[in-house]
Structures are given as structure tokens and as C-alpha cells.
Amino acid sequence: MYILGIETSCDETGVAIYHSQRGLVHHLLYSQIEMHSEYGGVVPELASRDHIRKLIPLIKQLLHESKLTKIDITVIAYTAGPGLMGALLVGAATAQSLAFAWQIPAVAVHHMEGHLLAPMLEENPPEFPFVALLISGGHTLLVKVESIGNYELLGESLDDAAGEAFDKTAKLLGLNYPGGVKLSELAKSGQVRFRFPRPMTDRPGLDFSFSGLKTFALNTFQKCEKTDQDKADIALAFQNAVAETLAIKCRRALQQTDLKTLVVAGGVSANTQIRTTLMAMIEKENGQIFFPRPEFCTDNGAMIAYAGYQRFLMGETQRLEIFARPRWAMSEL
Ligand code: KG4
Ligand code: ZN
């Protein structure tokens, strides 16, 4: 059976078709980066309007390029939250309308469960149980995963999410949205010169706090001449601090749960230095680490189609109602 996946929770319109036996058939992504970069960040109302413009044409193109028609689709999976309310409503309303017209069920998907399951789309997927580190623009979560839907929250960010910290630090260094990627590019020309703290690593526990790093970056920046090299050095020091803090907490989570498998997903997991630091830690621990391919680290329709398929197998379908939750804890799943 074919599952159509729809992602519209933020600034990316993602659609995909997943087949129950053959796996991912096709996916398309339209990014709104260019539109929002004029404003230095995501403008929610513009995001919603752009999803309205792009979503139906993208689904048509997806079906056409997959050589499928509407009668081939068995289920529609859509991101119901968390995310921007207006943007979520576009995906929810479109999914429910198509499901009604095509007389098929719709499944509401939790965006972070989508990220969590993205590595399952790869050739060599992880086996349960494992510890998952989810690092996106809105969330930093450490979760013990027994099976699909069986999640125990081990730790989370008490203030800024990892991606948010990247974006805010990028902004104060004068980099435009989307800051995370720009900051990581700048860090490539950085030299090891500053040492930033590794927040909340000197006490027990698995929670994170990244907002102090942004302030540390600002103070460091104000004390230097603000040359391009200064900026690159600060970017590198910031990125090092985030990468090492994540590695320390992941090692602790593995030891605490007595598990050897780590799954890392969400937009920030596309960061090369973070991937390398976590891989080095896992090697020392004799464990295994799994990431999605970089294009499935950030928002996409493929992970939603896959998560929706799993939820459908568990018997979950939505009644004909527009279901969107901007705030939605994973523990409620
Ligand atoms: O998962 P995602 O696409 O959307 C959310 O669910 O939030 O994550 C977006 C976040 C942004 O904060 C972005 O700056 C960050 O992921 N990001 C990165 C990189 N690519 C995306 N941060 C650091 N390095 C990257 N290469
Ligand atoms: Zn996301």
C-alpha cells in the first residue's frame, strides 16, 4: 500500500510517498528560505500562505513523477503538531479534505516522532531499544525508545533548543537566517582560540541549557575587534561547545539506560562537526550510532509518511476533523 505524507509545520512544504514493501518511493521539498530571509526569520503568516500556494501543486507533481494516481493511495499522513498553528492548519485541512474526497483514512503525525523515525528510512536502520537525541529548531530531547510509541523522556532543554541557540548566535554574529547552516559554514574557517562552557555537564542529570552559550558568544564578540576571523573563531568555539555538551549527555544517557545504540535526528543533526563528535564518543563506548541522511535531518515529507504508516499499522486514524496542535508533548503519544 502507498502512504502519502504531508509536512507543513514550519517553513518547509514536504510531501512524500512511502510504500509498505518497497519503502520510500519519492519525495519533494519546497523550502521557503528565500522568502523568509528578507525578514531575518520565519514570518508565520507568510509561511501559512506559501504552504497554501505550494502544497496542492507539489502533491500533483509527486503523484505524476511517481507514476501514481489518487486511487493508488491508501492513507494520508500529515504533521498535526507541534509547529506554527497556521502552517499546521494548511497541512491538516488539505490532508483531511483529500482523505474525504478520496474516501481514505488520514493519520495525524507528531512532528518529533517523524524526526525520531527518519533513520528508519535508511538501508541499515537501527534496532529497538535505543536512546534518541532529537535536536531541532524547537526541541532538544533525549528519549529512551523501547518501540514505536513507547517513549520515555530522559532529558530536554530547559531554555533554548539546540537549533534555536545556533540561529540566535548566528544572528548576533551578523549572519542571516537560516543561521544554523551559515554558522557551521563560518566555523570551517575558525581557529581554536576561545573556550566556551559545556553547560550543565558538571552536575548529574540529562537536561540541557543552551541560552548561556549565546550570551557567552555575545560577550566574547563585544570584547574583540569583530573581524571576520573573530566571527569564525567564535562560531567554531560555540559549535564545539554544543557538540561536546551533546556528546557528554548522550554518553550519560547510554550509561544510565544500559543501552549501546544512539539515534540522532532533527535539523541540527545535519551538522558535520556534531556528527563527528558523537561518532567519536560512540566508538569509545563500543556502541552504534545512526543518523538520517542529511536531507532527512531537516524537515521533510518522507519521515511523516513513514511515521504515519507506523501509526496506521497501530490502528490510529483520524475522524473527519481538522486536528492541529501547536504545542504537543511527545510523552502524550
Ligand atoms: O528539524 P528542523 O528542520 O525544524 C524543526 O523541527 O525545528 O530543524 C531546524 C533547525 C534550525 O534551527 C537550523 O538552524 C538547524 O536546525 N540546522 C542546523 C544545521 N542545519 C539545520 N544547525 C547546525 N548545523 C547545521 N548544519
Ligand atoms: Zn523539524
Image (cartoon, helix red, strand yellow):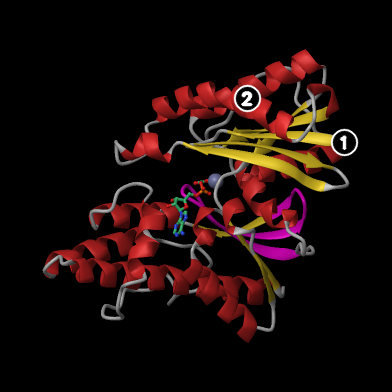
**Looking at this view, is 63 or 183 the one in front?**
63
Mark 1: which secondary structure?
loop
Which of the marked residues, 2 or 1, is nearer the chain's N terminus? 1
> Residue 14: x and y, percent?
60, 37
Q: Are marks 2 and 1 in contact (CB under 8 Å)?
A: no
Q: Residue at x 55, y 29 (%)?
A: 88
Vertical placement of 71 versus 137: above or below?
Answer: above
Res 92 label: 2
Amino acid type of the residue that numbered disc 1 sits on in the rendered structure: Met
Which residue carries the number 1 mark?
Answer: 1
Observer able to see residue 272 = yes
> Residue 126: x and y, percent?
75, 64
Residue 127: quarter of image = bottom right
Q: Residue at x 69, y 16 (%)?
A: 97
**Looking at this view, is 315 or 92 the one in front?**
92
Q: Is mark 2 within 8 Å of ligand 2?
A: no
Q: Residue furthest top?
A: 101
Vertical placement of 169 versus 299: above or below?
Answer: below
Question: What separation in Å lies between label 2 and label 1 (alpha carbons)?
Answer: 21 Å
Q: Is mark 1 within 8 Å of ligand 2?
A: no
> Residue 107: x and y, percent?
74, 31
Quadrant where the N terminus sits is top right
Q: Tell whether position 118 is magenta.
A: no
In the displayed structure image, the side of residue 17 where residue 231 appears, left or right: left
Vertical placement of 193 versus 231: above or below?
Answer: below
Quadrant where the C terminus sits is top right
**Looking at this view, is 296 or 9 the one in front?**
296
Q: Residues within 10 Å of mark 1 (few under 14, many from 20)?
A: few
Q: How many marks?
A: 2
Q: Which residues fall within the magenta stretch?
A: 129-151
Q: Residue at x 41, y 61 (%)?
A: 209
Observer able to see residue 323 = no
